Image: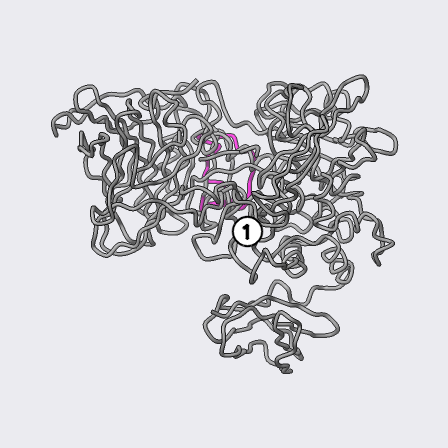
Amino acid sequence: MKKLLFSTLILTSALLVNAQLVPLNYSTYYIHNQPFATSIIQINDTVNYCKLIEKGVVIHTKLNKILTCNIPKSEIENVRKMPCVLAIEVSSFANSMRVKNDGARQHSNVDKVQEGLTNNLNANYDGTNVIVGIVDIGFQTDNPTFYAKSDTSLRIKRFWDQSDSGNAPVGYLYGHECKTSTEITNQIDVDGTHATHVAGIAAGSGLSSSNLKYRGMAPNADLVFVKIKYSNAQLDGSAYGDYIVANPTIIDAYKYIFDYAESVGKPAVINLSWGMHTGPHDGTSLFDLAVAELVKTKGHIIVGANGNDGGSQMHFRHNFNNDTIATIPYDNNRKNTPQESVYVDIWGSKNTPFKMQMHLYDTFKNKLASSPLINTVDKRNIGYWFNNGTDTAWVQLAIDSSYVNNQKPNILVIANHNRPKKNFLVIELMGTTGRIDAWNSGDAYVWSSGGFTNKIINAEFLPEEHFKKGDNENTLGENGGTGKGTISVGAYINRNLWINRDNKLTDNTEDYEAGAAAGFSSNGPSIDGRIKPDIAAPGQHITSAGNRRVFSVAPNNDLMETTVFKNDTNFWMQYSGTSMAAPHVTGIVALMLQANPNLSTEEVAATLKRTARADKFTGDLPNNKWGYGKVDALKALKETERLSGIILLALQSIKMYPNPTQNDIHIAGLPKQSMISLYDLTGKLLMTQSTNTTEYTLLLPNYAGVYLVSISSNGNTFTERIVRY
């Protein structure tokens, strides 16, 4: 059920009628009627943990200065005001998971890795003795692909259903943990089919599919599943719910999986095909900082989907020059809803305030009503209701004058109006200097999507009227795309021609080319300028297992096969999305961990980047559509084997910057007695130089291009791509 906007948290509210402010006493956000609120907190006291326990706070996950916890309803504001609490995500004011294998395994050379002995590898890698964790919703735990192909034993070792009640895992106060095969297969999840499909790509055995052809990347890995708690009795699955409810539970899920892996002495890689857009997109959110802490342990790797917003205009940017700019935020489903809702997160530049005002317009470009002018120097939560007769709008604002981890001002907006067929909302922004970046997730209270435009219905505003539309840059998601501790994955087209179960041929060869980037795959870079995604993998028209409990056998062009296992009919279907690309890389990382269980996130990411493939589709690499190129499992495994048992050549200390560069590249953290070589993309050696210093400045050729800088020492080699513009 869609929630009314004014039923959420409003600390100070006002009704704007004929430019007069009249105070209103709205009810507070639902969390105050519940015993506890789940949250992520950042503190500066890791000795006494801020004495939060004295406030009745139950701490779940401790990650240095980042905690997930439950806060008693009566203590939320007291905890917020504690001097040792730097930041808190609770009762504040995200776009979420979008469901969007046969040929894919060949694209990424996983088939050659699983026949490794014939391809000059030391083993036929299949994920043995590695934990693959899947954090998602929609698990069919008794799907045949989660059984071993050899003895049909269940490979799922743990299943934590966070949304159910029962026996919670030790250290947590919610959810139901299943440990035995019987408990796991009896735990029914009818919340879609997304998780089943994703898990099958990463580590399905393909059992019961013809010749195991729909097996995943790591078909013999052990599995740990966590069903995300993303809603509660008052808040359905939505952009808002992802930020408020799901974020801390995902961090708990990561910790739960890594703890289990440590208990059995195995490395683990976790897949998250879930995303949202609430946050600064620069790696400084509490979620991203928590992930960075989690992956400090070697053998603990997290892979995320980069997002499916590459084809939308959901990002907005403006560089202020003592001016005013405006835009129309819209929900993509506005024509089908009685009330239009938008959920917009706006971030400014460091230590640079800006102002904002909301307006309600009609399709004749008449301004009907306006909210008061909002200034980011005012750090508060506030709500307004403004109207012109029966044309009414509501807006809620969470204002932070300086976010603790990047010193940027932020306004988080939930706005709503009652006549989308007649009226629309306008955001007007004012500033002297600096830049603002905003993301529109669409409806705040259902999983939706949105954008920014200068034209709605027949009302078009021109640039000279100080209006701008959005763009599709910087559209990577917060959960899987922005973090420095997450390996982010973009998607490319797996195939454009197939025959389904009903022997129907689908031919999309005129629409797009196999191997090209998927149009939906989100674009980088991160707001702080990092190349994102890190890598690209097959993500369009990917076949994997489906959840038989929610799938209809009605005519379906994407149903590829039906099979019978233990007297139950199971389905193999194809979906598209970076949700499908990420588990390709997750499974490949599992193969790398099988070869070397002690790999760090930095080592895994560097190996994937160094061994990625370039072709006619990728163009010069790295870039913000492809990252460092197409994942190549065979090359990655050969490189992993080569470095197994060898300390990587100062991999974590070597830095090359700036990249991209205008003329030269500075290299720091060099081992002594190094040989530096420069190549072009054809492999032609352009120069070589030996050095016994720890720093070196390399002058690049006087023309733009992509180059390879190779550093050799003691028989080991480290190579990085450099872009000169």
The segment highlighted magenta reads: 43-65
Q: Nearer the viewer, residue 52 or 292?
A: 292
Q: Position of residue 406 (x, y in %)?
A: 39, 51
Residue 509: image quadrant is top right
**Residue at point 17% right, 20% down?**
389
Q: Position of residue 612 (x, y in %)?
A: 65, 57
Q: Is residue 414 above or below residue 266?
A: above
How are the residues colored?
one colour
Q: Position of residue 606 (x, y in %)?
A: 63, 59
* Residue on which disc 1 sits: 533
Count of numbered labels shown in the rendering: 1
> What crowding class fits label 1: few (fewer than 14 Cα within 10 Å), some (14-19), or many (20 or more)?
many
Is residue 175 one of those drawn in magenta? no
Could you tell me which secondary element the residue under label 1 belongs to?
A: loop
Specify the amino acid type for callout 1.
Pro
Q: Nearer the viewer, residue 551 or 401?
A: 551
Q: Is 46 on the left-hand or right-hand side of 23?
A: right
Is residue 58 one of those drawn in magenta? yes
Q: Nearer the viewer, residue 507 or 719?
A: 507
Residue 183: image quadrant is top right
**Residue at point 74% right, 28% down?**
561
Q: Position of residue 522 (x, y in %)?
A: 50, 46
Q: Quadrant of the N terminus?
A: top left
